[in-house]
Image (spheres, grey):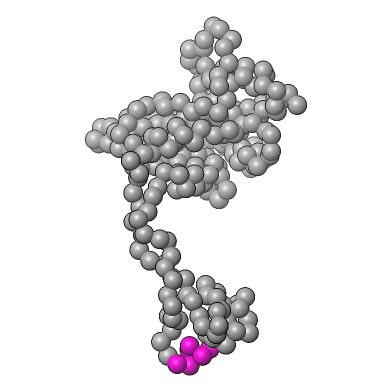
C-alpha cells in the first residue's frame, strides 16, 4: 500500500516529554514499513521523492532542529535509493555511524578528533529500514572501531541494532565463547552431591548446567579474542 507519513522527532528545544522523544525505533519492528531519516536538505527532497514513488508505506522521520537548516538542493526530481547509506567523511581510525540531526554533530566531532590525530569516518544511514548494513560493515572492517551515535534510548534502539549487526557479521574469533567442563566447578563432595541432586530432580533450576546420567556439565566462559576478518 503506497503511503507516506512525515513526522517530527528528536529533542533539543525544551519541549514537553510528549514532544521531545526519538521513537523511530518503534517502527523498525513493523513488517513492510520503510523508515527514512534525512540529515541534509538534499536528502530531505530526494528521500521524500523516493518515498512518494515507493509502492510501500514509508515513514519520513524529520528532526525538529533540521527544519531551519539550509543547503544545496538538486533541481531534478531524481529520487534517492531507500536503503543506501552515505559516507559523509572518509577516515581510517574509527567509524561513527549515525543519522538525521546527529550527522552534523558527528562531522563536527570528527573534525575535533582530526586535530588530535584521529581520522574518523562518518556514515550517515539515511534509511533505517531497510538498513544499509554492508556500508557500515565495510567501514568497520577498514577502521576496526565503531561508535554508534543516536538520540534514542540505548535499549532496543537503532544504535543497538547497528552494534548487534556488526558483532554478528564483522567480527571473528579463534576460540569458542564457551567451553564445556566435564566436571562440576564446585570442589567439595557435598556441593557436588547437591549439584547432582538439583540436576536430577529439578533440571530447570540448574542455572548454566544440564543433567546427564547424574552428572553435571557446566558451561563456563573462557577468554575470547576478537579480530576483524580480512
Q: Is residue 205 above or below residue 141?
A: below
The residue under the point 55% across, 22% down is: 81
Frontmost residue, 141 versus 17: 141
Point out residue 48 in the picture as x, y percentages from the top left corner. Answer: 62, 20
Give the residues in magenta. 189-194
Question: Is the stretch drawn in magenta largely helix, strand or loop?
Answer: helix
In terms of image quadrants, where is residue 181?
bottom left
Question: What residue appears at the point 54 percent right and 41 percent down from the top-left corner?
Answer: 158
Q: Percent position (x, y) of residue 119?
A: 29, 33
Q: Quadrant of residue 58?
A: top right
Residue 112 visible in the current orientation: no
Q: Vertically, is 72 above or below 128?
A: above
Quarter containing the N terminus: top right
Relative side of 114 to 216, left or right: left
Residue 90, image x, y percentages: 34, 28
In the picture, the quarter occupied by the C terminus is top left
Q: Residue furthest right?
A: 1
* Residue 168 part of the magenta-drawn span: no
Camera-side residue of 14 and 174: 174
Q: Is residue 7 left or right of residue 223?
A: right
Give how far across and how far down residue 150 sits, in percent.
Answer: 50, 39
Residue name at image x 30 percent, y 34 percent: 92
Amino acid at each position: 500500500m503506497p503511503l507516506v507519513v512525515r513526522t517530527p522527532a528528536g529533542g533539543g528545544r525544551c519541549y514537553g516529554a510528549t514532544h521531545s522523544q526519538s521513537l523511530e525505533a518503534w517502527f523498525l519492528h513493523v513488517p513492510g514499513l520503510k523508515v527514512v531519516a534525512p540529515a541534509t536538505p538534499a536528502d530531505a527532497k530526494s528521500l521524500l521523492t523516493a518515498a512518494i514513488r515507493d509502492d510501500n508505506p514509508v515513514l519520513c522521520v524529520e528532526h525538529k532542529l533540521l527544519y531551519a537548516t539550509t543547503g544545496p538542493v538538486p533541481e531534478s526530481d531524481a529520487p534517492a535509493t531507500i536503503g543506501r547509506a552515505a559516507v559523509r567523511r572518509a577516515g581510517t581510525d574509527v567509524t561513527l555511524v549515525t543519522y538525521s540531526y546527529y550527522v552534523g554533530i558527528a562531522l563536527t566531532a570528527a573534525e575535533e578528533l582530526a586535530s588530535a590525530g584521529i581520522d574518523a569516518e562518518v556514515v550517515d544511514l539515511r534509511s533505517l529500514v531497510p538498513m544499509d548494513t554492508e556500508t557500515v560493515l565495510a567501514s568497520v572492517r577498514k577502521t576496526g572501531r565503531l561508535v554508534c551515535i543516536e538520540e534514542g534510548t540505548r535499549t532496543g534502539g537503532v544504535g543497538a541494532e547497528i552494534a548487534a549487526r556488526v558483532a554478528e557479521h564483522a567480527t571473528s574469533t579463534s576460540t569458542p565463547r564457551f567451553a564445556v567442563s566435564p566436571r562440576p566447578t564446585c570442589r567439595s563432595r557435598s556441593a557436588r552431591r547437591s549439584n547432582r541432586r538439583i540436576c536430577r530432580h529439578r533440571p530447570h533450576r540448574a542455572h548454566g548446567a544440564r543433567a546427564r546420567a547424574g552428572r553435571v556439565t557446566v558451561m563456563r566462559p573462557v577468554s575470547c579474542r576478537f579480530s576483524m576478518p580480512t
